[in-house]
Amino acid sequence: MFPNKLSLAAYITVCLVWGSTYLAIRIGVAHLPPALFAGIRFLLAGAILLLILLWRGVSLPQNSSDFKHAFIVGAFLLFGGNGCIAWAEQFVVSSLTALIIAALPLFVALLDTFWPGGNRMSTLGWLGMLVGFSGVAILVAPGIFNQHMDVRGIGGVLLGTIFWAAGSVYSNRYPPGCSIWMGAAIQNLSGGLLLTTVGLLAGEYNRFHLNSQGILAITYLVLFGSLAAYSAFIYILHTMPPAKASTYAYINPVVAVVLGYLILQEPVSWRMLLAAAVILAGVLMVQLSRTSPQTPSKALQPVKSVKV
C-alpha cells in the first residue's frame, strides 16, 4: 500500500495530527475567543508558508482570477468551515465534533450532485447517503451523553461541515492556476483575515488574554495542523492513489475520540460507537459509488475531512 517509508510516515502524520486538531481547538476556545483564535492561527500559518515559498522562489499568482478563487476557497473552508467549528466547540466536545465531521464526504457528494455540471448519484451512492445521515441522526439525538445536547454547538458543526463541503466542490471546479502551495498560503491568509476582522468587530479583543494553554493550542495548530500535516497530505496524494490516500478520514474520528477521552475525559458511549460505524459505512458506500468504473471520468475526487 505504501510505496516507501516516507509515504508511511506521512500517512501516519496525517492520521494522528488531523485527528488531534479537534482536541487542540477545544482547548484553545476554552481560553481564547473563537474568531480571533482561529484567525490568528490561519494568519500565522499563511504568513509562514508564504515566506517559505517566496524564499524558495515560488512565484505569486500571475492573474487576478487565481487570487479570487483562492480567496473564495479560503472564505468557504477556513472562514466559514473552520470558523463555525471553532465557535461550536465552545459548546460541544471535540469527539462529537469529529464524528459529525466524518460525514463530510456525504455533504460533498450531495452538493456535487446538484452543482451545475455536477455528477449524478448512483443507487449505491443514494443508499450510502441514507445510511450515513442515519448515523448522524443517531449521533445527535438527545441523550447520547446523558445530558442536554447543545443545539448551538450541533448546528455550528453542521453548518461548518456544509461550508467546507461547498468550498471543496468549488475548489475542485476551479483548480488553482498557480502552485498548490501558493494557493494554500493565500487561502490561509484570506480565511485568517476574515476571521480576525469578525473577531475584532465582535469585540473579542476585550476577551483575548493569552495564557500558556492558548499559546500552545495556536502553536500546535499552526506548526502541526496547518503546516506539517498538510505537507504530509500533499506528499501522499503524489505517491498514493487518491482512494487510498483518503482512507485517513476513517482514522481521524477514532483518534479524536480516544484523545478526547484520555485528555479531557470526554464521555464515550456505545451509542457514539454505533453512530460512528454507521456514518463511516455510509461514507464508504458513497465513495465506492463515485470511484467505480461506471463513474464519469470528471467525477469529484474524494476529499479530505476538515483540515482543522
Image (tube, rainbow, N blue to C red):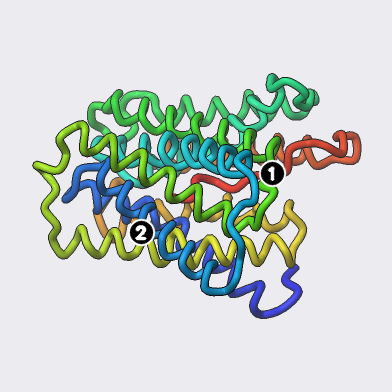
User: Secondary structure under badge 1?
Assistant: loop
Q: Is residue 274 visible?
A: no
The disc at residue 175 is 1
- What separation in Å lies between label 2 and label 1 (alpha carbons)? 24 Å
On screen, residue 174 above or below 22: above
State the residue in front, 170 or 157: 170
Please state the horizontal and vertical placement of residue 20, each as a whole percent of the image. Answer: 40, 58
Residue at 78% x, 27% y: name it. 119
Query: Badge 1: few (under 14), some or many (20 or more) residues near its Cα, within 10 Å?
Result: few
| Horizontal relation, residue 192 to residue 287: left or right | left
Please state the horizontal and vertical placement of residue 60, each as a whole percent of the image. Answer: 58, 57
Q: Amino acid at mark 2?
A: Leu
Q: Amino acid at mark 1?
A: Pro
State the residue in front, 276 or 57: 57
Please state the horizontal and vertical placement of residue 274, each as a whole percent of the image. Answer: 49, 38
Residue at 38% x, 24% y: name it. 141
- Residue 24: name its quadrant: bottom left
Q: Which residue is mark 2?
A: 44
On screen, residue 26 above or below 83: below
Quarter the N terminus occupies: bottom right
